[in-house]
Image: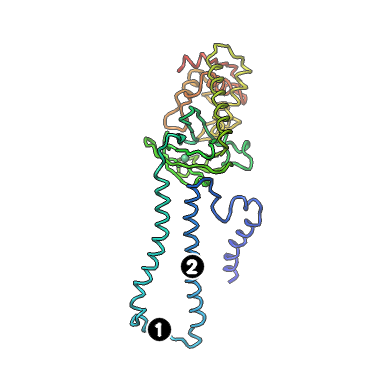
Amino acid sequence: MCFKRIYTLKPLLLILGMLLLGTAHAEFGVNFPEPAGELAQDIYDVHMLTMQVATFLLIIVFSIVLYSIYFHRKSRGYPADQNFHNTWFGHWSWVIVPVMVLGVDFTIAHNANNVLKTVWEVPHEKEIMDVKVTGHQWWWEFDYLDSGVKVESRALTKEQSGDLYLRDVDNRLVLPTGKKIRFLHTSGDVNHAFWVPELAFKKDAIPGYVTETWIELDREGVFRGQCAELCGTWHSRMPIVVEAVSGDKFNQWVDEQNAVKVAAAAEAASDKAWSKEELMAKGEELFNTKCAACHQINGTGLPPAFPPLKGSPIAKGPIEGHLHIVLKGKEGTAMQSWSSLNDLEIASIITYERNAWGNDTGDVIQPADVKNAR
Ligand SMILES: [Cu+2]
């Protein structure tokens, strides 16, 4: 008896404790997050309609059951009805009840069908903004097809993200409000799924296929989501952070991104000989944003999946081998090719890896070395 009471009480106390804690409130609201667009609102409304119908029916059914059990109990002298199936209602209830249930189902299905049509019928307007969303193990790539901006988005490490661990990224997916946006989903390796609750839909990112979703954001804000398809060891480290801003702020952001890109390309193309200090400073910043999620900021990695670079035979061995693995990746492992980075970026990262954390090889790799190794 005593044991039973403890087993029933424990979960209840746990839930009560979680609700009383301020942190629990932030994570567990009583309903879905507030939608950030009309389409998301329509999906939310179908959910609310279903919940209202279900609650209404639940109250009616439970009231009848509880009333019958209490007021017609055996101790009051009520015998079990042996003749129910021979009455008029006994005959017809098997038809009437399913018809009523179907009626309720069709009411919900009709609404859901209308919303689904809107979800699937992606508007093919000239004005629509296209964003290609590519899932990778384990990061997101966002290509703004109209402006040529590319955003690589990776989870921040525990030290960098603090309370938002596994919920925060280095580069956000910035989107304008009041404009129709079409997402083109695909994957560079295995199946992933793009999911941000405020945008309402989930869509699988399948290698070799392109699927579409769309949204028109109606409020500014920061919306957090994650990969919703089990995609390997670090599936949990693929958060998505959408930042919705006004059209003007968005245009300004695009201009800034393009300016940074032009400046970086010009810098990388110059035949300047870089000093070790300059390369180390650049390399540290790049390593911490692009490589540290796997190899960790202190270079110790997370073996066996992600080998340490501190004291590693690659980082302390021949430069050619180091260049090769960064440029080409390593098949059968999570180490991808980083050839999309420019020569200066790769030279900085390799110089940093060969001199940080006590590796102290003294090697300085110039952009020209990377160019030759490509
Ligand atoms: Cu994924």
Q: What element carries label 2?
A: helix
**Mark 2 to mark 1: distance in Å?**
24 Å
Image spot of residue 284 (x, y percent): 60, 25
Tell me: residue 117, above or below residue 188: below
Residue type, label 1: Asp
At a point 62% along the width and 18% down the height, the residue shown is: 278
Left or right side of 331 for 169: right
Image spot of residue 159 (x, y percent): 63, 37
Tell me: residue 281, above or below residue 238: above
> Mark 1 sits on what residue?
81
Which residue of the protein is positioned furthest toward the bottom in this rendering?
77
Image spot of residue 249 (x, y percent): 58, 33
Residue type, label 2: Leu
Give 98 or 274, whichever is nearer the viewer: 98
Which dot marks residue 112? none
Left or right side of 85 for 148: right
Q: Mark 1 and ligand 1: say if the CB distance to the nearest ligand atom is below 8 Å.
A: no
The image quarter in which residue 302 lies: top right
The image quarter in which residue 329 lies: top left
Residues marked 2 and 1 touching at CB (< 8 Å): no
The image quarter in which residue 260 lies: top right
Q: Is mark 1 on a helix, strand or loop?
A: loop
Image spot of residue 143 (x, y percent): 47, 31
- Say few, some or many: other residues with alpha carbon within 10 Å of mark 2 (under 14 / 14 to 19 / 20 or more): few
Q: How is the image coloured?
A: rainbow
- Foreground mark, 2 or 1, reads 2
Image quadrant in which the N terminus is located? bottom right
Q: Mark 2 and ligand 1: say if the CB distance to the nearest ligand atom is below 8 Å.
A: no
Q: Which of marks 2 and 1 is nearer the N terminus?
A: 2
Which dot marks residue 58? 2
